[in-house]
Amino acid sequence: MPSPAKNPHLPFGDQRSAPWYGKDIISVKQFSRTDLEYIFGVAHEMRVMVERVGTFDLLKGKILASIFYEPSTRTSSSFIAAMERLGGNVININEVRYSSVAKGESLPDTIRTLECDADVIVIRHPELGSAAKAAEAAHKPVINAGDGVGEHPTQALLDAFTIHEELGRMDDLTVTMLGDLKYGRTVHSLSRLLSLYNAKLNYVSPDILRMPSEIIAEPEAKGMRQAEHRALDKPLPETDVLYVTRVQRERFEDPAAYEKLKSAYIISPEVMKAAKHKMIVMHPLPRVNEISYAVDTDPRAAYFRQMRNGMYVRMALLAAVLGKA
Ligand code: NCD
């Protein structure tokens, strides 16, 4: 369910009844099935508009402040592209060492500063809970672009949109998540989001990178079917969505432990022979070596299409929180 709206003073012409107007997007727990249908519908319209006209003026005059305390290529650039395709402007801070953060400014003060200039703030930060902390400090909507090992809600929304676009449904699917399920925030958000549907979840990981028990407990409480595996061979033949993740090197204290695990699973054309004819392989990207390049030409490889969907979903989310969807 959406959190209480911020920014109640709407400029003339904005849609006061828009359900996500003025809301923060911090966790996928805020979303219901109806919310997802709404976001998917708007994202689909955004795709049609971009393919037809490229750029249009829905958010003309609006400013997004985007601040990334952790590296990013896709998330950061797709938020920027989303805002610019909607005719808005962006303040982009991705080198926090050149900002006042380097002088010791606190997160709430940085956020209060950015909201003086912008209408919406996107933040990525290495600490779990940082996006919620930023949202508490801000009067303008804050969007979580990844808070450490916590959540990555906009990625889960674009993942769900991709599944919906590619397979035409969200129910009655077997989704197999593979790789670093302990530190991978995208799988944390996605398994929570899929618990809204009648899906079966398989978790395949090395023992020390298992899905955290508190995350398994949430879909469990909703009666969802979940199974843990150490090897992919058993769940692969029943899989409709194979969601591959990289081992998150930056979250390891011991580089030797990372080296031991980084090649635990590699998806190759040989491995894909055991998969269904109609299924998809997804990856939030960046990949390191967990999907071989030879798989890219397999029509089931959906990860580049998934990445493109990121811009449409983020266009929908920006329009929604700014009351223009
Ligand atoms: C993911 C992230 O940052 O959590 N990347 C992304 O946003 N597409 C996945 C990752 O870094 O492995």
Image: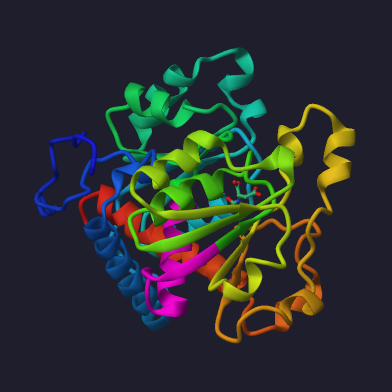
Q: Write down the region rendered in magenta.
A: 154-175
Note whether 268 is above or below 220 in the view shown.
Answer: below
Q: Position of residue 73 (x, y in %)?
A: 64, 52
> The N terminus appears in which quarter of the rendering?
top left
The quarter of the displayed image where residue 168 is located:
bottom left
Along the line of sight, which residue is nearer the eye, 74 or 181?
Answer: 181
The residue sitting at 69% across, 83% down in the picture is: 298
* Prevailing secondary structure of the magenta residues: helix
Judge from the rendering whether residue 311 lies leftward or rightward of residue 100; answer left or right: left
The spot of residue 238 in percent (x, y) is 57, 73
Foreground residue among 246 and 222: 222
Most foreground residue, 301 or 209: 209
Q: Residue at x 66, y 78 (%)?
A: 275
Q: Is residue 121 left or right of residue 302?
A: left
In the rendered image, residue 172 lying in the magenta stretch gets the answer: yes
Q: Is residue 10 left or right of residue 132?
A: left
| Residue drawn where x is 44% and y is 51% of the image | 154
Q: Residue, x 45% and y 78% (percent of image)?
A: 167
One can see residue 230 in this view: yes
Q: Position of residue 300 (x, y in %)?
A: 62, 80
